[in-house]
C-alpha cells in the first residue's frame, strides 16, 4: 500500500490546480448545472497529477479521457486541460522519447476525434488537431530537455562522488599493462632456462649438460636484455615482422614449424608472436618432452595460428601466473579474432584465428571503426524539429479558425496556397536554430519580407500586422539562439535590431493603424527591440555561463588526470625498482652460474626469478575501491569479466555525463567472454558489444531507459547477441 501513497513533493502541483479550479468557479460563476461535470473533471485531474511521476502514461490517459468526455464543461473546468499538459510533460520527463511522443500523438488524435464527433467541420477538426499538436510538440520538447538536464546533473554528481577512484584505477591499469609485458617476455626466457637446466640435471648426460649450459647462457643474456628493455621503455612490444616468429621457433629445435602465410601485417605478426611464445612457454612448463608443432596459415578470411603438443611431463607447473591464455584471448578478441585453447587427445592445442587487419571480424570486410545503424532521434536536433511543429501548428491552426469579421485568408485558392507556403517556410528555420542560428534568422526575416511584399502586391489577403504577431516568436527564438549558440558570428546586436525593423514595418502596415504609418512603425519597432534585445542578451549570458562551467569542468578533469598520471608514474617507478632488485637480479645470477657451469644454481636462480615474477603478476590489490564511472574504467571492467575491449578513434576528454552514460552501458552489456568496441566519434561515443548469452529483455529495457535519458539510442540484432549504442555529445 505504501507504494501507492503519493509523495509529499507530488502534492503541490495538484493542490495548486485544485485551488485554481475553485477560484475560477467562484469568479466565473458558470451555470450550476455544469457543477457535476466540473467536479468530476477536477477530481480526475487532481488524482492524475498525484501519480504523474509514478505512472505518467495512465495518468495522461485518465486526464485526457475525462477532459474529452466532459467537453461541455471544460470551459468551466480549467483543471482538465492543465492536468493534460502537466501529465504529458511528466511523460516526456520520465519515459523514453518514443513512448512520450506516442502518448502525445494519441492524446491529440483523441481530441481531434472528439471534435469531429461533436459536430465540428473538417476544417475545425483540422485546426484543433494542429493547435493541440503544436502545444503537444512544445510540451514534449520542454520535457525532453528537462529529462536530459536531470540525467546530466545526476551523472555529474555520481562522477564527482567517484573522482577519488581515478588514482587507484590508473595504478591498477599500469600494473596490469606492465604485468602483461613481463609475462610475455621475461617469463618465457626464464621458463626455458629452468626447463633446460632441470632436464640436464635429471639425465646427467654430459652432452645434454653442455647444450643446457650454452642455452642457459644465451637465454639468460636475452632475459637480462629483455628486462633492461622493459625497464628502459616501460611499454609494450613494438610491431614486429613474421620473421620474429621464425626466430622464436628456431630456438626450440624440438618444435616442427610450418608457415604458409608469406606476408603478414606487422600488428598481426606481433600478436601471432605473442601467441606462439605463450603456447611454447606452457609446453615447456606442463608438457616437457612432448612433440610439438606450430602452423601459421592464411586464407581469404585471415590467418590461423595453431600450436599443438602430444602430451608430456610437468616440469615447472608451480611458477605460472594463470593469466597467459586469458590475456591472449582478450588481445585476440579485441582485434576481431578468436582463440580456442583446450585438450586435444593426450596433449593440448591452442588455435587463434586473426583477421587480415586488426579490428576486422574474420570473414567480413574490415571494420571502419564506426557504430553503424545507430543514430539518436531523441536529441537536441529532434527538439528543434518539435519547435518547427509548434510554430507550424499554431500559425496554421489560427489561420484555419478565423475570428470575428476578419476576411477568410483561405477563401481564394492562390492566396491560400501562398499563405500556407509562407507559413511553412517561416517555421522551417527553427530546425537549424542551434547549428546555424545566423543563417536561420536571415532566412526567417527573408520570409517575413517576402510576406510583406506579397501583401502589398495583393497576393495574400491577410493583415500583415496580424501575420507578424502570429509568427514573431520564431524570430525571438532565433535571436536568442544567435546569442546562445553562435555569439561570434558577427551579427551581434544587429540581430534584434533587424527583427525590430522588419516587425516595425509589418505592424505599421496593419489595417488598424491610422495616421502616419511610418511614425507608428518606428515606435512599434522600438518597442519590439526591448524584448528582442533582452532575448539576445539572455542568450549571451547563457553562453558565458556555459563557458565558465565548461572551463571549470575541464580544469577539474585535468587535475584528476594529473593526479592519476602521477600515481601511474610512481607505480611504474616502483615496479621497475622491484624488477631491478628481484627478477633481473635472479636472471643475472642465472647467467653468471651458467657461465661458471653450475647448472643446479642456474635452475635455482631461474626458478627464483619466476617466483618473483609471479608475485609481481599476482600483486594487484584485491581490496581497491570500485573504479569510477568513466570510459577509462571499462578496460578494468572488461578484465574483471574476462572480456575483450578495444578503442577506436582518438581518445579525448569528454563531459562527465557522457563518461558516466558510456560506463553504465558498458557495465550493463559487458559479460564474461564478450567482445566490446568503444568508438570515439566526431559528435559522440559509440559502443558495440558482442556477447553470449544474449541480452535479457529486462536488461534491454533498462538499457533503453538509461540511454534515452542521455539522448542516445540502441540497436539490437534479432538474436540479441550484438548491441550497438550511440551516445551523442551535447552541443557546446
Image: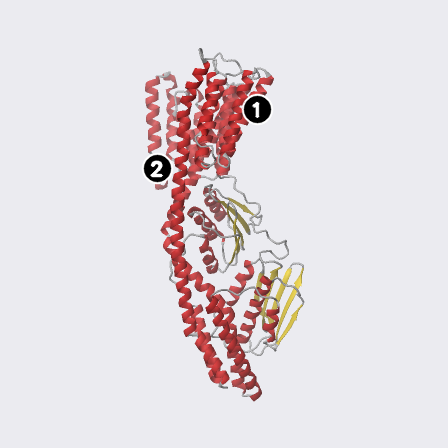
Front one among 593 and 141? 593
Tell me the residue at 37%/39% (across/down): 4
Query: Relative to residue 414, is residue 99 depicted above or below?
Result: below
* Residue 482 position in % (x across, y down): 46, 33
Quarter occupied by the N terminus: top left
Q: Is residue 558 visible?
A: yes
Res 13 → quadrant: top left
The colour scheme is: secondary structure
Front one among 459 and 387? 459
Query: Relative to residue 731, is residue 475 depicted above or below?
Result: above
* Residue 465 position in % (x across, y down): 47, 18
Tell me the residue at 52%/82% (across/down): 197
Q: Which mark is residue 691?
A: none
Dot 2: within a 10 Å radius of its alpha carbon, few (fewer than 14), some, or many (20 or more) residues?
Answer: some
**Does residue 365 appear left or right of residue 650 in this picture?**
right
Furthest residue toward front:
490
* Residue 362 position in % (x across, y down): 62, 57
Dot 1: within a 10 Å radius of its alpha carbon, few (fewer than 14), some, or many (20 or more) residues?
Answer: few
Q: Which mark is residue 421?
A: 1
Front one among 481 and 675? 481
| Element type where label 2 sits in the image | loop
Q: Which mark is residue 6?
A: 2
Tell me the residue at 55%/27% (across/down): 425
Res 218 → quadrant: bottom right
Amino acid at each position: 500500500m505504501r507504494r501507492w501513497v503519493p509523495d509529499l513533493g507530488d502534492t503541490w502541483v495538484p493542490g495548486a490546480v485544485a485551488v485554481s479550479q475553485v477560484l475560477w468557479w467562484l469568479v466565473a460563476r458558470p451555470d450550476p448545472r455544469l457543477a457535476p461535470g466540473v467536479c468530476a473533471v477536477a477530481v480526475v485531474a487532481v488524482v492524475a497529477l498525484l501519480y504523474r511521476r509514478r505512472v505518467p502514461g495512465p495518468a495522461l490517459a485518465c486526464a485526457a479521457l475525462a477532459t474529452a468526455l466532459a467537453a461541455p464543461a471544460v470551459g468551466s473546468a480549467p483543471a482538465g486541460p492543465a492536468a493534460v499538459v502537466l501529465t504529458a510533460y511528466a511523460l516526456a520527463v520520465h519515459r523514453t522519447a518514443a513512448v512520450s511522443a506516442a502518448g502525445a500523438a494519441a492524446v491529440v488524435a483523441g481530441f481531434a476525434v472528439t471534435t469531429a464527433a461533436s459536430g465540428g467541420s473538417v476544417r475545425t477538426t483540422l485546426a484543433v488537431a494542429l493547435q493541440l499538436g503544436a502545444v503537444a510538440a512544445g510540451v514534449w520538447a520542454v520535457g525532453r530537455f528537462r529529462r536530459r538536464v536531470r540525467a546530466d546533473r545526476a551523472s555529474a554528481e555520481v562522477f564527482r562522488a567517484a573522482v577519488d577512484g581515478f588514482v587507484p584505477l590508473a595504478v591498477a591499469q599500469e600494473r596490469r599493462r606492465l604485468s602483461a609485458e613481463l609475462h610475455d617476455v621475461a617469463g618465457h626466457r626464464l621458463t626455458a632456462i629452468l626447463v633446460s637446466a632441470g632436464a640436464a640435471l635429471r639425465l646427467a648426460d654430459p652432452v645434454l649438460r653442455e647444450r643446457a649450459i650454452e642455452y642457459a647462457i644465451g637465454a639468460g643474456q636475452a632475459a637480462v636484455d629483455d628486462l633492461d628493455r622493459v625497464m628502459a621503455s616501460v611499454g609494450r612490444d613494438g610491431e614486429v615482422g613474421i620473421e620474429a616468429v621464425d626466430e622464436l621457433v628456431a630456438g626450440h629445435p624440438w618444435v616442427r614449424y610450418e608457415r604458409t602465410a608469406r606476408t603478414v601485417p606487422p600488428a598481426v605478426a606481433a600478436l601471432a608472436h605473442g601467441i606462439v611464445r605463450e603456447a611454447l612457454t606452457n609446453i615447456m612448463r606442463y608438457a616437457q618432452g612432448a612433440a610439438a608443432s606450430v602452423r601459421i596459415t592464411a586464407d581469404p578470411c585471415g590467418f590461423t595460428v595453431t600450436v599443438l603438443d602430444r602430451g608430456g611431463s610437468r616440469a615447472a607447473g608451480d611458477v605460472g601466473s594463470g593469466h597467459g591464455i586469458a590475456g591472449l584471448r582478450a588481445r585476440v578478441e579485441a582485434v576481431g579474432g578468436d582463440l580456442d585453447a583446450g585438450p586435444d587427445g593426450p596433449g593440448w592445442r591452442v588455435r587463434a584465428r586473426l583477421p587480415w587487419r586488426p579490428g576486422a571480424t574474420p570473414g567480413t570486410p574490415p571494420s571502419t571503426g564506426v557504430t553503424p545503424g545507430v543514430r539518436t532521434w531523441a536529441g537536441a536536433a529532434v527538439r528543434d524539429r518539435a519547435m518547427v511543429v509548434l510554430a507550424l501548428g499554431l500559425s496554421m491552426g489560427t489561420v484555419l479558425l478565423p475570428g470575428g469579421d476578419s476576411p477568410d485568408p483561405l477563401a481564394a485558392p492562390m492566396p491560400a496556397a501562398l499563405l500556407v507556403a509562407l507559413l511553412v517556410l517561416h517555421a522551417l528555420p527553427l530546425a537549424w536554430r542551434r547549428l546555424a542560428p545566423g543563417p536561420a534568422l536571415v532566412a526567417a526575416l527573408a520570409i517575413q519580407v517576402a510576406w510583406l511584399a506579397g501583401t502589398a502586391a495583393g497576393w495574400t489577403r491577410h493583415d500583415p500586422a496580424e501575420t507578424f504577431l502570429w509568427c514573431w516568436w520564431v524570430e525571438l527564438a532565433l535571436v536568442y539562439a544567435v546569442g546562445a549558440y553562435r555569439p561570434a558570428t558577427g551579427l551581434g546586436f544587429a540581430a534584434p535590431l533587424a527583427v525590430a525593423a522588419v516587425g516595425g514595418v509589418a505592424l505599421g502596415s496593419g489595417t488598424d493603424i491610422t495616421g502616419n504609418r511610418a511614425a507608428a512603425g518606428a515606435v512599434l519597432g522600438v518597442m519590439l527591440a526591448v524584448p528582442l534585445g533582452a532575448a539576445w542578451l539572455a542568450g549571451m549570458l547563457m553562453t558565458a555561463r556555459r563557458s565558465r562551467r565548461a572551463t571549470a569542468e575541464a580544469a577539474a578533469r585535468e587535475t584528476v588526470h594529473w593526479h592519476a598520471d602521477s600515481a601511474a608514474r610512481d607505480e611504474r617507478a616502483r615496479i621497475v625498482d622491484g624488477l631491478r632488485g628481484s627478477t633481473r637480479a635472479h636472471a643475472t645470477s642465472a647467467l653468471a652460474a651458467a657461465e661458471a657451469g653450475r647448472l643446479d644454481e642456474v635452475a635455482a636462480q631461474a626458478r627464483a626469478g619466476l617466483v618473483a615474477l609471479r608475485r609481481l603478476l599476482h600483486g594487484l590489490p584485491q581490496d581497491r575501491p570500485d573504479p569510477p564511472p568513466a570510459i577509462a574504467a571499462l578496460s578494468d571492467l572488461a578484465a574483471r569479466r574476462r572480456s575483450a575491449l578495444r578503442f577506436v578513434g582518438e581518445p579525448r576528454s569528454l563531459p562527465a555525463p557522457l563518461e558516466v552514460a558510456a560506463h553504465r552501458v558498458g557495465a550493463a552489456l559487458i559479460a564474461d567472454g564478450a567482445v566490446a568496441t568503444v568508438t570515439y566519434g566526431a559528435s559522440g561515443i559509440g559502443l558495440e558489444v558482442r556477447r553470449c548469452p544474449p541480452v535479457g529483455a529486462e536488461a534491454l529495457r533498462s538499457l533503453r531507459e538509461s540511454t534515452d535519458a542521455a539522448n542516445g539510442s540502441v540497436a539490437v540484432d534479432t538474436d540479441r547477441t550484438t548491441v550497438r549504442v550511440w551516445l551523442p555529445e551535447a552541443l557546446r
